[in-house]
Image (cartoon, rainbow, N blue to C red):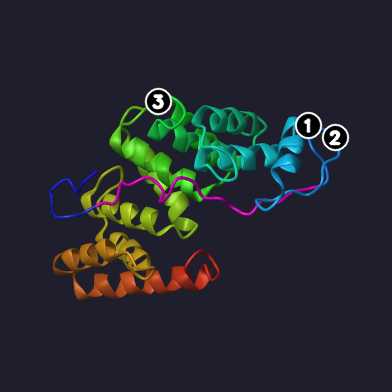
């Protein structure tokens, strides 16, 4: 999506990279009471496969990622999707997000935006910031779902509150252009500042673009809100 008047820029790329391989929090249990050793990305393929076949969601997810990226096994999209589906069906959030990526990009499955929305939505509901951001993009673009600026604002907002700089940038654009929310340059300036502080150059450019449209009092208020948000969110992503 671009700014409605063409003066703003919005980053709408999907999350960077094929997958965000978050640290696996493995336990000693598989599905139900099936015992399984703690597994991670460094575990031998035989161990991962054995645990995955026993129903251990983390192992299924890791095995899916390995097949998707061709790590220690031949790259095999359909096999990746098979394992990710099994883990995602157990509610494993990273698998749900990754499966959304597979459907969005048409990797291992025919491209299907509606399925991407479905899996991003499940991961987003569990609080995954990357899924929340991508879901916001889908609503903003009308990909796999009816275009809905208000829903885009909702999901960008949840990801932005977790410190996602792309979501902060896009949320700033929504407030600056009045898409899905009433126009509010103070709030837009705040989100642009927070995103720019994490290195988003487009956010810095957007902030510069709206400053001439603001009063000195509005700028001071926006800076206060940005500082306040940072103080309340120490330790979140880039803070």
Question: Within the magenta stretch, is there residue 214?
Answer: no
Closer to the camera: disc 3 or disc 1? 1
Q: Give the mark, 2 or 3, whose residue is nearer the N terminus.
A: 2
Label whose residue precedes the other's in the sequence (3 or 1): 1
Q: Quadrant of residue 62?
A: top right
Residue 230: x %, y % from top left: 46, 71
Q: Name the residue that disc number 2 marks.
A: 34
Looking at the rendered structure, the secondary structure element under dot 2 is loop
| Position above or below: 229 against 128 | below
Q: Nearer the viewer, residue 185 or 61?
A: 61
Frontmost residue, 203 versus 76: 76
x, y percentage for residue 226? Answer: 38, 70
Bounds of the magenta segment: 10-27
How far, Cα to Cα, is label 2 from label 1?
A: 7 Å
CB of mark 2 within 8 Å of CB of mark 1? yes
Residue 91, percent from left and from top: 65, 35
Residue 4: numbered disc:
none
- The residue indicated by pointer 1 is 54
């Amino acid at each position: 999506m671009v700014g409605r008047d063409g003066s703003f820029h919005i980053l709408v790329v999907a999350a960077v990279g094929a997958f965000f391989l978050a640290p696996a929090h493995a336990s000693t249990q598989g599905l139900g009471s099936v015992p399984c050793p703690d597994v991670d990305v460094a575990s031998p393929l035989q161990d991962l496969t054995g645990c995955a076949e026993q129903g251990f969601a983390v192992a299924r997810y890791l095995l899916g990622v390995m097949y998707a990226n061709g790590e220690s096994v031949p790259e095999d999209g359909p096999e990746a999707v098979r394992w990710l589906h099994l883990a995602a069906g157990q509610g494993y959030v990273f698998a749900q997000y990754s499966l959304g990526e597979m459907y969005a990009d048409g990797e291992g499955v025919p491209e299907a935006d509606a399925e991407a929305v479905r899996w991003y939505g499940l991961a987003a509901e569990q609080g995954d910031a990357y899924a929340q951001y991508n879901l916001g993009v889908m609503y903003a673009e009308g990909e796999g779902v009816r275009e809905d600026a208000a829903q885009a604002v909702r999901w960008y907002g949840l990801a932005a509150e977790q410190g996602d700089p792309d979501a902060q940038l896009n949320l700033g654009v929504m407030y600056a252009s009045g898409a899905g929310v009433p126009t509010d340059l103070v709030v837009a300036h705040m989100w642009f500042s927070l995103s720019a502080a994490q290195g988003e150059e487009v956010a810095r450019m957007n902030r510069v673009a709206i400053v001439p449209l603001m009063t000195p009092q509005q700028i001071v208020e926006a800076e206060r809100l940005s500082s306040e948000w940072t103080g309340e969110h120490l330790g979140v992503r880039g803070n």
